[in-house]
Amino acid sequence: MPDALLEVDSINVWRGASQVLHDVSLSVGEGEIVALLGGNGAGKTSTLATISGLLHPKSGDIRFSTGQESISLPSLRPDRIVRLGIAHSPEGRQIFGGLSVVENLRMGAFLRHDKEIDADIERFYELFPILGERAELKAGQLSGGEQMMLGLARALMSRPRLLMLDEPSLGLAPQVIDQIFDRIEEIRAQGTTVFLVEQNAAMALEVADRAYVIENGRIAISGEARQLAEDPSVRKAYLGIEMSEDAPVETTS
């Protein structure tokens, strides 16, 4: 595995009186695509929210490598975590519907003060050509797939080293999902590490290097994506595929 960019170490997290994460540990290596799989309510979104500083663990640690040092995140404000190089594209896209496409992109760069914001906007118009065509259109008028592309591009406007995506395929048609996952692979190829939370296990395991499965707030299985794609329990629970008992299987847990 490459050097760790993000390390989550035995975090325990509550929402109100309910514990939502139990001793969750995982890592994301520099340059990887790592997937976190699980059903509704398993703890996927809570994991991302804790890394982003929106939730705070009662115990455990989360560390992010800047290249010069490893920094503990739980005590930091969300804006400081963004400045360190972590961007979060949330579930449901949460774009600003009353603002134009280009205004949404500029919002993604709100912590930046350099002179390359316009150049980055043009770069993302090349990555997502439909956004360039819709630049002055209100974001609320975009299709679901176009809004997802805008959410991705807006997150990338902060120039993150780590991009966290929460359910990018949610509610999208199959052909649009293919386009989104093609862009995710391209984003990684351009140098951004990706931590992908996704219910569409088949697509996630296709693009990911490694994956974790979370159930009831606990990491249940982990390993290389290709190995998890052949794990009988993963195939049955998340891919809808039964395997014969005598089929050779390689797993990591």
Image (cartoon, rainbow, N blue to C red):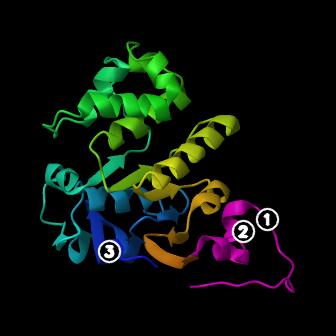
Q: Which residues are magenta?
A: 224-253
Magenta-span inclusion, residue 230: yes
Q: Indicate whether 152 appears above or below 142.
A: below
The one nearer the camera, 12 or 149, is: 149
Q: CA distance from mark 1 to mark 3?
A: 32 Å
Depth check, front residue: 199 or 134: 134
> Tag 2: residue type?
Arg
Q: Quadrant of the C terminus?
A: bottom right
Q: Which residue is mark 1?
A: 241
> Mark 3 or mark 2, which has the lower sequence index?
3
Disc 3/disc 2 C-alpha distance (Å): 27 Å
Q: Amino acid at mark 1?
A: Ile
Q: Nearer the viewer, residue 21 or 164?
A: 164
Mark 3: few, some, or many residues within 10 Å (few <14, many ≥20)? Answer: some
Q: Residue at position x 46%, y 79% from top?
A: 1
Residue 169 visible in the current orientation: no
SS label for mark 2: helix
Residue 156 rendering spot, x and y as whole percentages: 35, 43
Image location of residue 68, percent across then percent down: 18, 71
Disc nearer the start of the sequence (2/1)? 2
Residue 173 is left or right of residue 28, and the answer is: right
Q: Mark 2 Cα within 10 Å, few/some/many (few <14, many 20+)?
A: some
Up/down of 155 relative to 75, above or below:
above
Viewer-closest of 183 and 99: 183
Q: Is residue 126 left or right of residue 30?
A: right
Image quadrant where residue 151 sits:
top left
**Mark 3 sits on what residue?**
7
Dot label at residue 69: none
Q: Which residue is mark 2?
A: 235
Secondary structure under badge 1? loop
